Image: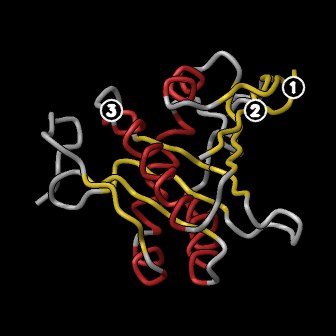
């Protein structure tokens, strides 16, 4: 039975994946990544994004989870279908043990506008506290919807770098950096 991720759901479950679960979730995470890049998200990949490249990326993330270098959180619709994800990169240099980077906050396009991203961001704060992190950093496309999400979640805008990255279609985009003390 397949889950219709467009159907309204009363709740999603946000949970942290261990190493084995992360490895087993690589195909589902690749689906979310491919959907987001196809939809125009500037998240390090260009369109078209070959599935093998998406699978390799998530396999690397699962390896990072196994090495305790990353925290991987997922949003699951009823039935366990992954509809969103966010990571906390915790492996930092010796002089930055208190800091972590938030990366790849992704929500499948069919599951957006339901508060899932907000739930993921609250969960990443909790995960950071559990890991003993007090300063978080992230970056996002300047002018995108995510800027408002992060500001509502208590993040402070640090600055903008013009033409920092490319959109999946090859157009330049600025990047806004945010930080948060927790």
**In the image, which disc is placed on residue 161?**
1
According to the image, label 2 marks what residue? 177
Q: What's the residue at 50%, 52% (across, down)?
A: 124
* Quarter of the figure that contains the N terminus: bottom left
Most foreground residue, 124 or 67? 124
Q: Position of residue 47 (x, y in %)?
A: 64, 39
Crowd rating for badge 1 (residues with CA inside 10 Å; few <14, some 14–19, many 20+)? few
| C-alpha separation, residue under disc 3 versus residue under disc 1 | 28 Å
User: How many numbered tags mark residues here?
Assistant: 3
For image coordinates 69% across by 42% down, the residue present is 138
Horizontal and vertical percent position of residue 146: 55, 27
Does residue 151 lie above or below 116 as drawn? above
Q: CB atoms at circles 2 and 3 under 8 Å apart?
A: no
Query: Which quadrant holds residue 139?
Result: top right
Vertical arrangement, residue 162 with respect to residue 48, above or below? above
Q: Residues within 10 Å of mark 3 (few under 14, many from 20)?
A: few
The part of the image, by quadrant, that contains residue 159 is top right
Viewed as shown, does residue 78 lie left or right of 120? left
Callout 3: SS: loop
Residue farthest along the top direction in this orientation:
143
Where does label 3 land, which residue?
115
Helix, strand or loop status at disc 1: strand
In percent of the image, x 56 and y 74: which residue is there? 62
The first of marks 3 and 1 along the sequence is 3
């Amino acid at each position: 039975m397949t889950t219709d991720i467009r159907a309204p759901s009363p709740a999603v479950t946000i949970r942290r994946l261990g190493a084995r679960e992360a490895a087993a979730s690589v195909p589902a995470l690749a689906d979310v990544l491919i959907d987001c890049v196809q939809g125009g998200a500037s998240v390090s990949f260009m369109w078209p994004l070959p599935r093998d490249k998406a699978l390799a990326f998530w396999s690397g993330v699962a390896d990072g989870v196994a090495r305790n270098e990353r925290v991987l959180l997922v949003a699951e619709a009823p039935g366990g279908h992954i509809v969103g994800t966010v990571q906390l990169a915790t492996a930092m240099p010796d002089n930055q043990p208190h800091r972590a980077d938030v990366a790849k906050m992704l929500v499948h396009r069919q599951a957006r506008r339901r508060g899932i991203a907000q739930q993921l961001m609250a969960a990443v704060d909790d995960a950071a506290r559990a890991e003993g992190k007090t300063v978080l950093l992230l970056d996002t496309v300047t002018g995108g919807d995510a800027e408002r999400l992060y500001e509502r979640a208590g993040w402070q805008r640090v600055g903008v770098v013009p033409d920092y990255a490319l959109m999946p279609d090859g157009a330049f985009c600025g990047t806004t950096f945010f930080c948060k003390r927790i």
